[in-house]
Each structure stands twice: as C-alpha cells, then as structure tokens.
Amino acid sequence: MNRLLNVFLHRKINRRDYLVRHGVVLGYLVLLTALLPRSFRPVQDYTVGKPWTNADLYAPFEFFV
C-alpha cells in the first residue's frame, strides 16, 4: 500500500497530456460562452407598482399546484 501511494504521489505527468487536458477544458469554455446569449431583454416591459398595460399573459401549458 505504501509503495502504491509513493508511485501515485511521484508520478510524472506528461507535458503533452497536461496541455491536451487544459486545451479541452478551455475549448469547452469558449464554446459554451459563444453559445450563450450575450444579453437578455424580456418581451414584456413592466414597472413595479404600475398596472399591467400589455395583453393578458398566458402560459402555453397547464400544471397542477
């Protein structure tokens, strides 16, 4: 058990493997940020404390509470 622990702790990490792993993570983050919307603007505009001036807002589905 002690020998296995020493091998695990002193294992040399290949530089190429290190770059590939970090490159995959970096590529995933770049792809994720490219696909997410830059800003969000709601279709309805409302102000807290004022009456609702738009047409009635209905959900496209029903669910039980």
Image (cartoon, rainbow, N blue to C red):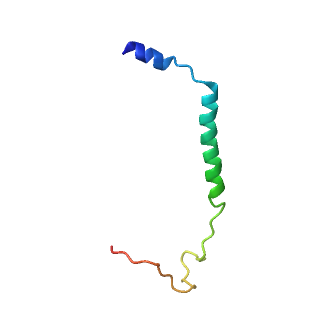
Across and down, in percent, residue 64 comes to 33, 75
Q: Is residue 16 above or below residue 5?
A: below
- The residue located at (55%, 86%) in the rendering is 55
Number of numbered discs visible in the structure rendering? 0
- The residue located at (39%, 78%) in the rendering is 62
Across and down, in percent, residue 21 comes to 59, 35
In this rendered view, identify the residue nearer to me: 22 or 44: 22
Residue 38: quadrant of the picture: bottom right
Residue 27: quadrant of the picture: top right
Q: Is residue 9 above or below residue 31?
A: above
Across and down, in percent, residue 7 comes to 47, 16
Q: Is residue 20 above or below residue 64?
A: above
In this rendered view, identify the residue nearer to me: 51 or 1: 1
Residue 15: quadrant of the picture: top right
- The residue located at (57%, 23%) in the rendering is 13
What residue occupies the far left of the structure in this picture? 65
What residue occupies the far top of the structure in this picture? 3
- The residue located at (47%, 79%) in the rendering is 60
Left or right: 63 as drawn, with respect to 45: left
Quarter of the image containing the N terminus?
top left
Q: Is residue 22 above or below residue 62?
A: above
In this rendered view, identify the residue nearer to me: 57 or 33: 33
Across and down, in percent, residue 16 comes to 64, 28
Quarter of the image containing the C terminus?
bottom left
